[in-house]
Image (cartoon, helix red, strand yellow):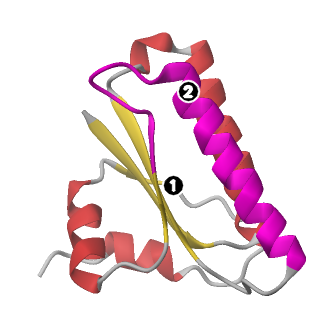
Amino acid sequence: MSLVLSVDRLDYTKGLVHRLKAFETLLEKHPEHLEKVTLLQIAVPSRTDVKEYQDLKEEMDQLVGRINGRFTTPNWSPIRYIYGCISQDELASFYRDAAVALVTPLRDGESHCIKECSAPPR
């Protein structure tokens, strides 16, 4: 099983919705990846009092539900979605286990995720 890891603040500039739709397209067009690739999407809460961010969270929840509903088997779910903060130890463990780090901002400055993913294990 290959793990694709994606870690971002829940922010429209991060391309999260596009990322989920692209993963769905991958599963549709390449069914040989079913039960072989899992996307772990970690979305850290951001600006939770702003309506647009609340709407984005709702859209993410619905997309994850739709994709998992379409492709889940008794032994596998295509997307594991964590909305919340995780510890540095947990994050380091996910980075070690991931085959791919998926970083797809629509607009962004410097991405710390890329530095974290490429850092040597301790």
Which amino acid does the dot numbered 2 rest on?
Gly
Q: Position of residue 101 (x, y in %)?
A: 43, 57
Q: Is residue 90 above or below residue 60?
A: below
The picture quadrant where one finds residue 9 is bottom right
Cα–Cα gap, marks 2 and 1: 22 Å
Dominant secondary-structure state across the stretch colored magenta:
helix
Q: Is residue 63 above or below residue 11?
A: above
- Placement of the C terminus among the 4 image quadrants: bottom left
Q: Residue furthest right?
A: 51
Q: Residue furthest left?
A: 122
Q: Is residue 8 left or right of residue 59?
A: left
Q: Secondary structure at mark 1?
A: loop
Depth check, mark 2 against mark 1: the one in front is 2
Residue 20 appears in the rendering: yes
Q: Residue at x 88, y 76 (%)?
A: 51
The picture quadrant where one finds residue 110 is bottom right
Residue 106 appears in the rendering: no
Could you tell which of marks 2 and 1 lies nearer the N-terminus?
2
Q: Is residue 84 left or right of residue 60?
A: left
Q: Residue at x 41, y 12 (%)?
A: 32
How many marks the image carries: the answer is 2
Q: Which residue is mark 1?
A: 102
Q: Which residue is mark 2?
A: 69
Q: Residue at x 31, y 20 (%)?
A: 74
Which amino acid does the dot numbered 1 rest on?
Leu
Q: Position of residue 82 (x, y in %)?
A: 46, 62
Badge number at residue 37: none
In magenta, the rendered stretch is 51-80
Circle 1 packing at 10 Å, graded few (<14), some (14-19), many (20+), is: some
Q: Position of residue 97 (x, y in %)?
A: 22, 55
